[in-house]
Image: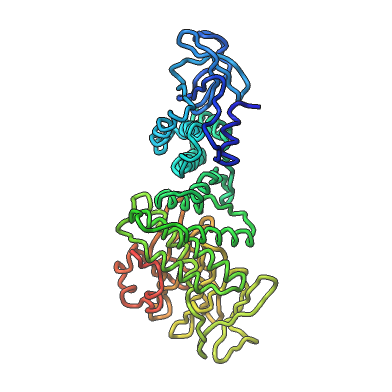
Amino acid sequence: MKAPMWIALLLGTGLAHAGPAPQPANPLAIVSQDGATLRAQARHSAAPQAVLWQGETLEVRGRTLDYLEVYDHRIERAGYVRASRVRIVSMRPDDAPELLAVVRFLRDMPGSESLGIAYTAAYLKAAPGKAIDAEPFDALGVMAGRLAERASTNRTKSQEQSLSGELEVAADYGVAIRSVDRNGHMRLCYDGDAFRRVMALGATAMQKATAVLALTDPACVDSGLPPVQRAAFDAWRADLLDRAPRDGLPRYVQNRLHMREASVWSAIAFEHTRSHEPAQQAASRAIDELAAVDAHALAESDHDDYDDAAIRVGASRWAAEPQVVAGNGLHIVTAAGGPGETCIELVDRKHGAKTPLAQRCTYGTVWTSSARANADGTALALAVQPMTSWRELWLFHVVGKHWAIDVLPPADDDPQLGYVEFAGWVPGGRLMLAAREARVNGRFVHRFEILDMATLATIRQADKPSSLSPFYRYQDAIWKSQTVSLRN
């Protein structure tokens, strides 16, 4: 059995131990720098046995000049390593505070995650059981999550080799990092075991908030989860967020919790709608959480998360609105189509459901209360949401002597995050106002547009509605009172 396995067992099976931990027969050393070389003999010209990575634990068996004679249980090989490349650690209970001080330093030191994980494991081994609280697990979770995030970004060949070694070292300590499919792209994510321990211990409000935000991170939600499992997971995320304290937290951390809750509850609202369950309460909760964000107290790094949460809420916001009884003029009715399908029929006083003006079926969610007809009875805008965070605008309009149905998506690239919505009719029956928010090639687009209904081409656009005079004059009052696009 590998010698470091005692650390993996400690992390994996619990913390309780009645007294001081038994000491290994030989002292242990932790590799402090990437690229340390394990050599066959105690000299620089000796043949290299292996390359060692920071955080790797070695059993020290002797010393020759400036080299330590060691045994690496992870690769099951003995050799010599320069003493300056490692740090000998003591596992005595009296030395536990010193180990914890190093953990505190490394917790927020990017690039030293595997080293910090090693010192955390050493502290957990040395400290008496009664002295262990949530702090080392908070640090372990933060460092493991940051290591996974670093390993998910683009990197050079040398960085890739180093990260691969550090991931192996972390895995040897029992830290589980898994691959997650994010819309066809693979991402590495920490499984969150340390953060779950934080929630079970007497953690501070800040430690619990850090754990909750990590455990509910949407970037680590597998996009391939079946609907039932995704709904259960989102319900678990919502419950976890409700358990996060707010008192005593800095305003920017409270903002992060509000943004995360807005995202989660908007997903729940959509899931409830798809399963024909009441969704108004969940959607209203999402809108309220977004409104609770203090935009003036956002950390610079949180602006993208704010836009992300707003788009998710905007995509599902119609779930918060009550059903509206259609009048006798131009309106839509829906009927069940094939399994999972909803068929939309455009009708008016002269054309009923048996002889509709236009008809089309969709697997998306049709927000019937969003339907808005123009005064001339020649066009109708409708919100249709095919996915949790993607809402389209369907335009029913007269072209010549016939009715056409055009679909306007939030963006032209992969349908992942975005919505586009009707914002008003411009008199004359040719132009329409729209608001659009989407993530395009990693950047957020937030704009207001004047569209040509015949082609759906954008005639004019601006990042503020006040920059377009037709918005000032013709914006729809109901849209203005309900939209989240005017939050800034």
Quarter holding residue 72: top right
Quadrant housing the C terminus: bottom left
Q: Is residue 7 above or below residue 340?
A: above
Task: Tell me if I can see residue 160 in this picture.
Answer: no
Please provide percent x and percent y for residue 185: 56, 47
Q: Give x and y (percent) for residue 450.
A: 39, 69
Judging depth in this view, the residue of 447 and 305 nearest the camera is: 305
Extreme-front residue of the structure: 19
Residue 240 in view here: yes
* x 32%, y 65%: residue: 464
| Along the line of sight, the residue nearer the viewer: 118 or 216 | 118
Q: Nearer the viewer, residue 159 or 295?
A: 295
Q: Quadrant of residue 38?
A: top right
Work out whether 92 lies above or below 365: above
281 versus 293 height, above or below: below
Q: How is the image coloured?
A: rainbow
Q: Residue at x 61, y 23 (%)?
A: 75
Outermost residue toward the right in this view: 339
The image shows a total of numbered marks equal to 0
Q: Position of residue 316 (x, y in %)?
A: 50, 68
Image quadrant where one finds the N terminus: top right
How far across and down, in percent of the image, does residue 324 sit? 50, 83
What residue do we see at 53% from left, 29% from top? 161
- Which residue shows up at 50% across the image and 57% down it? 240
